[in-house]
Amino acid sequence: MTRTRGRPPKTFEETEVIRSQIKNATAIVFGAHGYHGLSVEHILTQCGLSRPTFYRHFSNTDEVLNLVLQEVNDKLINDITLAVMSVDDPTRKVDAGLLAWRAWGESISPMLSAIFAGIHDPTSPVAKHRQRTVAVLIMELNKMAMALGKPPFKTIQVETFLIGVEHLGYSFHLGPDGPTEAAWQLTRQTMMRLALGLLGGSVEWAIAPQLTMAMGLNLD
C-alpha cells in the first residue's frame, strides 16, 4: 500500500478519518499478530500512512490499542445490557445475554484469538479491559438479582460463570469445526447449565426440572 505524506490535517473531520484509519489498522494487526507482535511499522504497512502522521495522532501503539479495546469492550457491555433488559421473563434473561455474547464474538471475530490470549497475559492491556468488563457484568447481574428479590451473587460464583462462558464462547468461535448451529446448541446447553448451577439458589434448584424444561435444556 502506498503511504500518504504526513501533512497535518486541516479539519476535525479529516483528523477523525485518519484516527479511524489508524485504529482500524491496529485492530487488524492486533488480530493477526497479537499484542506482542503489534508495532507502528506493521500498523503503517496496513493503513498506508506515514510515521509522522501516526505520531501526530497517537504517542505509541498502546494508546491506540487501548482505544480499540475500550470500544470493543464497551460494545460487549452495551449489547449484553440491552439484550437482558429487552426481555421480562427471568428464565430468558441469561439466554438473551448469551446470544448477545455470541453476536459480539461474531462481530469482532478477527480479533478474538488475540483477545483470548491477552486475557491470560498480565502484561497485555486486554487483561485490564477485561477486568473492567467483568466488574460491570457482575454489577448488572446483581441488579437483575435484586429486581427478582434475590440477594447479590457471590463474586466468586459470577467470576467462575463468566470464565466458563468465555472459554465456551471462544471454543465455539475458534473451534476446528467452525461456529455451526449444532455447535452453538451444545455450547448454549453447557452455558445454561453453568448459569443454573452457579447463579441458581435453593429456589431455582427446587424447581430445577421445570426450569430446565423452560430453558430447553437436555439433562440426559
Image (spheres, rainbow, N blue to C red):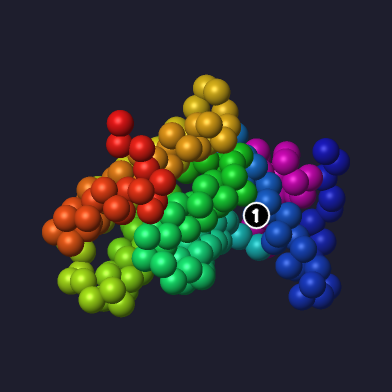
Place of residue 153 in the rendered image (x, y in percent of width and height, measured from the top left) = 21, 64
Residue drawn at (33%, 71%), measured in percent from left and top? 144
Residue drawn at (68%, 51%), measured in percent from left and top? 24
Is 98 left or right of 205, judged from the image as shown? right
Residue drawn at (37%, 43%), measured in percent from left and top? 217
Q: How many marks?
A: 1
The residue stretch that appears in magenta: 38-56
Res 5 visible: yes
Is 154 left or right of 140, judged from the image as shown? left
**Which part of the image, by quadrant, shows the C terminus?**
top left
Place of residue 114 in the rendered image (x, y in percent of width and height, measured from the top left) = 50, 38
Place of residue 94 in the rendered image (x, y in percent of width and height, measured from the top left) = 39, 58
Q: Nearer the viewer, residue 148 or 78?
A: 148
Mark 1: which amino acid?
Answer: Lys
Place of residue 52 in the rendered image (x, y in percent of width and height, measured from the top left) = 71, 55
Q: Nearer the viewer, residue 92 or 199?
A: 92
Q: Nearer the viewer, residue 64 or 180?
A: 180
* 127 inside magenta stretch: no
Residue drawn at (18%, 71%), measured in percent from left and top? 151
Res 40 visible: no
Which residue appears farthest toward the left when viewing the image?
202
Label 1 belongs to which residue?
23
Q: Quadrant of residue 10?
A: bottom right
